[in-house]
Image: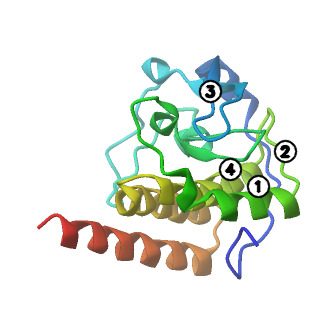
Amino acid sequence: MLFPKGHDKYPTVRPEEYDKFLYPHNFTCPHCGQSFDSVTPLTSKLVTKGELACDMRKNYQSFDILWYEIVTCPHCYFSSFESGFEASHRLKKEMFADKLELVKRNLVLEFKEPRTLDQVFASHYLALICSAGFESKKQIDSKLWLSLSWLYSDVRDLKMESFATEKALEFTNLYYSETE
């Protein structure tokens, strides 16, 4: 229901050393309005590792930002980049509410620390559903699919990495074709 055909289970737990890069943060969900506590990376502590990769991925010493780039409301499963939780965004809830509710009714997902890679994948796929509520949907989808391709690369799932890369290219092309 949430994952595409070919997606596997990835129960890997994030490394303990990530703790020193995380700080608690209280979020208010723009979808359901409830508050919840989560963590967010303290980016000022991150040190880049090497040059920017040819796939445009930024790598950091002792921390993988992909594990924490998406925030998920544990009450309604609304998921987005942290900026999507800011009040300045106009969110069109009707564009994704039914689909998100269907997922919520049929899947029990837990979002707790320490995160597992399964939770990271779930948050990204939930964010793809919720992106329909933002004006910049194609741009958000492009970034999400690119992040998913990197995650699949990390678990050495070449078939799913290729699938996600193709989707990232598709949405990037759609985004740029509309901005010409």
Give me the C-alpha separation between circle 1 and circle 2. 10 Å
Q: Mark 2 is on which residue type? A: Glu
Question: Which circle's residue, 4 or 2, is located before the other in the chain?
Answer: 2
Q: Mark 4 is on which residue type? A: Val
Give me the C-alpha separation between circle 3 and circle 1. 24 Å
Q: Is residue 37 visible?
A: yes
Q: Which residue is mark 1?
A: 118
Question: Which circle's residue, 3 or 2, is located before the other in the chain?
Answer: 3
Question: Between residues 29 and 139, which one lies in front from this camera angle?
Answer: 29
Q: Which residue is mark 3?
A: 28
Q: Which residue is mark 4?
A: 120
Q: Secondary structure at mark 3?
A: strand
Report the residue that reaches farthest toward the front.
94
Give me the C-alpha separation between circle 1 and circle 4. 5 Å
Image disc number at residue 110: 2
Please state which of the two labelled residues, at mark 3 or mark 1, is closer to the viewer. 3
Q: Secondary structure at mark 4?
A: helix
Q: Which residue is at 28% across, 66% downward?
A: 175
Q: Which residue is at 36% across, 54% downward?
A: 135
Give me the C-alpha separation between circle 4 and circle 2. 11 Å
Please state which of the two labelled residues, at mark 3 or mark 4, is closer to the viewer. 3
Q: Secondary structure at mark 1?
A: helix
Question: Between residues 10 and 51, which one lies in front from this camera angle?
Answer: 10
Q: Is residue 128 visible?
A: no
Q: Mark 1 is on which residue type? A: Asp
